[in-house]
Image (cartoon, rainbow, N blue to C red):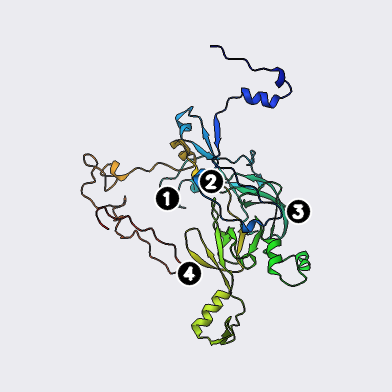
Amino acid sequence: MLQPRIPLRGLQHSCKYFSSLLSRTYATVVESQPAAPEASVDTISSFVPPPSHAKGGAEIRRYKPRTPGLRHLRRPVNDHLWKGRPIHELTFPKKGQGKGGRNNTGHITVRHRGGGHKRRIRMVDFNRKEPGPHLVERIEHDPNRSAHIALIRSKLTKKRSYIIATEGMRAGDVVQSYRAGIPQDLWDSMGGVIDPGVLAARTAWRGNCLPLHMIPIGTLVYNVGLHKDKGGQLCRSAGTFATIVAKAFEGFDPESDVITDERGETKHLTLQDKHRLKKLSEHVTLRLQSGEIRLIHKDCCATIGVASNENYHYRQLGKAGRKRWLGIRPTVRGLAMNAMDHPHGGGRGKSKGNVHPKSPWGLPAKSGYKTRPKRKVNKMVVTPRPRNQGKRRRGYN
């Protein structure tokens, strides 16, 4: 049966529509739910609710199974990324022992690493100490991390640098760092006195870097520092964030032995109470995604928002070759090796010869013998991360 021809008379002035009819598509974008509307300029992005990690709402690109490697390939849709090369002055090559899991003597200290595509390390600015507004020129893919990076240019010094992009950040946005202090124009707008409401409305925007004591309670932050003189170290991977639970305790005089509570009652402080209140007056309480609650110094830096590329954990590589492109070599089970290569190897069939689980070097690998790390007491951790409870044995309650 002959198929009807496409009428070309009405499509002569619509080349874009005509090319879309004749083009052969190999990928499809699945949108289960409509995307959330972008925050307007009048809204404060710091008070946006946490991102939804439901798999139905993620935009994932699926490919037609022309080859076995494309059948299971899944990639998040990131059409806003820069298609060209990075800034050469802000990169340096990754060479030598850094690609093979070896130390300075050439011995393998981390197994199953090696090969992979050649890379250039992007010099990301985690400190962001330079004040003033910065213009976001573009969003780029960084092969060395899961989150995206943003190329920003200072409007004052015209200096360019890379930062970790915030979820929703696009080219043309303006971000600023307040680590050097409050600018003079902001002081004048508040009348020379710190107004918490005005300060939060003017500074707590998506992508801005602030000290923790300037960020309002309930704000989602990422790229959080652990030391007041260093850059961000926590929550730097794709889609991660921390929530500010409580601010620093104000109104404490370390020289006084008496404190007045909210009801007006005075209380004599012991030495332990003075140490505890002094600690609370210098730190901010944060809750991580793992459930751990930490105390971090109030002068440490943090960036408002959520780290970009939050749909990263929905990806599927599709084939083993892409794992090799990333520099990860195969992992062989000890049971499948020979007896000379592993304590579990050898024998007939799937049998490890009545041997207790051991590492390749003969050390016990279970029951807590040299496998469970010694739990170091961290004074900054208020509530530790909850450990995963083991599955109940079948037949027992």
Q: Are marks 1 and 2 in contact (CB under 8 Å)?
A: no
Residue 54 position (above or below residue 277): above
- Amino acid type, residue under disc 4 in the picture: Val
Q: Quadrant of residue 129?
A: bottom right
**Distance between the alpha carbons at the discs numbered 3 and 1:** 44 Å
**Distance between the alpha carbons at the discs numbered 2 and 4:** 30 Å
Give percent across and percent down for residue 94. 55, 46
The residue to which callout 2 is attached is 311
What secondary structure is found at the residue carrying circle 4?
A: strand
Q: Residue at x 55, y 41 (%)?
A: 59
Residue 213 position (above or below residue 209): below
- Amino acid type, residue under disc 2 in the picture: Asn
Q: First in sequence: mark 1 or mark 2? A: 1
* Mark in the foreground, 1 or 2: 2
Q: First in sequence: mark 3 or mark 1? A: 1
- Amino acid type, residue under disc 3 in the picture: Lys
Q: First in sequence: mark 2 or mark 4? A: 2
Image quarter in which the C terminus is found:
bottom left
The residue to which callout 1 is attached is 110
What secondary structure is found at the residue carrying circle 1?
A: loop
The residue to which callout 4 is attached is 382
Q: Residue at x 61, y 66 (%)?
A: 212
Q: Which mark is residue 155?
A: 3
Q: First in sequence: mark 2 or mark 3? A: 3
Give percent across and percent down for residue 355. 23, 50
* Mark in the foreground, 1 or 4: 4
Residue closest to the eye, 119 or 376: 376
